[in-house]
Amino acid sequence: MKTVMHLLEKELIEYRIVLKLPLFLALFAVLNFALVMSGDNVSFSVQTSGIGGWALDSGTTGYAGFIGKLNEWVAGVVYLILFLVYFPKTLRKERQEGSLMFWRSVPVSDHLAIGIKLLFGLVVIPFVASLLLVFSDAIVWLLAKWLMTEEVISSFSVTIPAMLWHWCSFIGRMAVISLSLLPLACVLLAVSQLTNHPMVSVIVAVIVTKLMAYLLLGTSAVGDFISDVYSLPLTILTNAQPVEAYLSLGVLAHVVLLLISGGLFFLCSKLRSTDDFS
């Protein structure tokens, strides 16, 4: 366990953007909060039509209505951005900076090294994003306490228990998104060891696969399935039922994707153990 924690700490030190991006957004929220509270005439209005100071929508349930959902979307998008920053780069960086040879000298297997990167990208990063959600929800709670009546606060569930439940449900949603991102993470880790431009290579491969499948089969079914796979994280993020959205591809499809992920995991470990790739 100590080795795992040490390796996760190393990833966090090397990729400070995982902390810097949420921190920047948090500071931006604090700045806006300060500007609101420093105004000479601070006022606040709520209309059930959704038009008002906060544009709270009475049709949106959960913590703080629409604003709570907006906080959730922002934190989720931050996770997706950091995912796309981290996975295409992490293994290439080891080779380019020469640190790979050092890590081979310590008692850390290639399987453990790849597993740590998956753990960091699919567990640590979304957890950090969830802290941004907690901070944003806390700002909403403070504004509500200063600017809203107790009746309005209660009607929009701007309470500490509702905030905690909002965070817990977000953690569950991020877990489902991480599961849907596992195949893509393994693809990026493998491709990043074969080319200097993994994201471009993956995008080109997807486009070519869609085009060839359509020309050979005369149908866009294969292309539509690929589109559903890479758009699944956003679908889960915006869907009211994340598990239902995840299962929309079908159980068999997910079993195949998980098997492919397992194969790519071992391929990544094999590629990391060799020096035959530029």
Image (cartoon, rainbow, N blue to C red):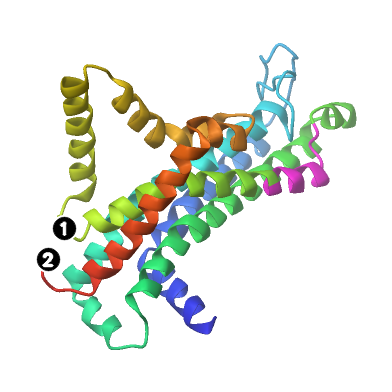
Q: Amino acid at mark 2?
A: Phe
* Residue occupying image coordinates x 32% and y 75%: 110
Query: Circle 1 sits in a helix, a strand or a loop, which is it?
Result: loop
Q: Residue 159 lies in magenta, yes or no?
A: yes
Q: Position of residue 181 (x, y in %)?
A: 43, 46
Q: Label 2: which residue?
A: 277
* In-front residue for pair 198/27: 198
Q: Position of residue 265 (x, y in %)?
A: 35, 61
Disc ID at residue 150: none
* Residue occupying image coordinates x 64% and y 35%: 36
Q: Residue 201 lies in magenta, yes or no?
A: no
Residue 166: quarter of image:
top right
* In-front residue for pair 13/168: 168
Quadrant in which the N terminus is drawn: bottom right
Quadrant in which the C terminus is drawn: bottom left
- Residue 174 visible in this rendered orientation of the protein: yes
Q: What range of the chain is rendered magenta?
A: 157-168
Residue 212: quarter of image:
top left
Query: Circle 2 sits in a helix, a strand or a loop, which is it?
Result: loop
Q: Are marks 2 and 1 in contact (CB under 8 Å)?
A: yes
Q: Give the distance between the C-alpha atoms of the residues marked 2 and 1, in whole angstroms.
A: 6 Å
* Residue occupying image coordinates x 74% and y 32%: 62
